[in-house]
Amino acid sequence: MNEPASWAGIGPGDRGTPAADWARWLAERAPDPEFTVPDGCRRLVVVAPHPDDEILGVGITASRFAAAGVDVTVVAVTDGDASHPDSPTLTPQRLAELRVEESRRACTLLGLPEPVRLGLPDGRVREHRARLADALVGAVGDPGHDTLVLTTWRGDGHPDHEASGRAAADACAATGARLVEYPVWTWHWAPPGDPRVPWGRRRRVVLTDVELAAKRAAVAEFVTQVAPLSALPGDEAILPDWIVDRLVTREETVFW
């Protein structure tokens, strides 16, 4: 996920739309179709701009593909070393090492492979869009028509998320793979029904009790993000409870 919501034009103290408001709105609208493993899908490439996006956004979705026998590749675009730029406790290098290990453990809990790490600069993915697109073309392989690329939405409100989505779209155009997007920061800056969000393309993955518990356990592995690094300024949690509550719910969302 990474970085405060100011990426999306929201002030640092703004908590965005409460989880309860999202739950109420989603319950009141006509149920969106469920997203399942498409017939003929042999490969899934999950694009995570930062370590934890793959779990927060589509951890259970990806685990269902893996359980169905689909070849799943998780591509970690950055190592997340910029999540605490003012930390007096951890250097960016040490933070990246910890975040990589957290992501590996979280993926293991959900039956996902260890992510392929590209090590692009955190916060500057858009400067490396062509390099990312080339890497994703390689991950898709040939032929690409039996592959889905599941990436952060191109309108998600964080530059790394949007650049990753655009690079994934480039890779799909080059290979014939199918692009599917997922929101992460959207849940913070958008109000329910926001017309900027493609709700008409929404598909949902409804989690079982066991899957919800597994996702919570996987998210808890991201200690550097869900808890303060220390009590000192600059070490605040990036994912406090009120953000996690918005992201770890009964449903995961993709834009199909």
Image (spheres, grey):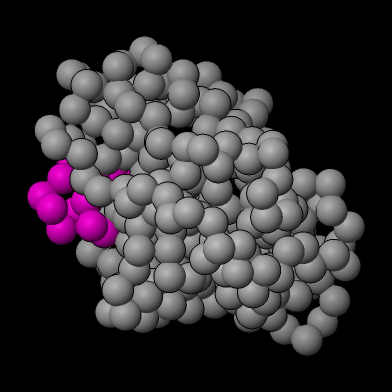
Residue 115 at x, y percent in the picture:
35, 51
Q: Against 69, is 233 above or below?
A: below
Instruction: Tell me where the magenta segment starts and ends, as one range.
Output: 63-75
Q: Residue at x 46, y 19 (%)?
A: 170
232 left or right of 211 in image:
right
Near-viewer residue (5 or 200): 200
Q: Is residue 115 visible?
A: no
Along the horizontal axis of the image, is 247 left or right of 112?
right
Q: Nearer the viewer, residue 236 or 4?
A: 4
Q: Position of residue 19 (x, y in %)?
A: 64, 71
User: Is 68 placed above or below 161 here?
Assistant: below
* Image quarter of residue 4: bottom right
Quadrant that contains the C terminus = top left
Q: Look at the image and tell me whether residue 9 can be seen.
A: yes
| Residue 54 counted in the magenta span | no
Q: Whole-percent x and y of residue 211?
A: 31, 73
Q: Quadrant of residue 197?
A: top right
- Farthest bottom residue? 231
Which residue is located at x 43 percent, y 77 percent?
216
Question: Taking 114 as reference, is 68 left or right?
Answer: left
Furthest toward the top, the residue is 174
Seen in the picture, residue 2 relative to 237 is either above or below; the reply is: above
Residue 71 painted magenta? yes
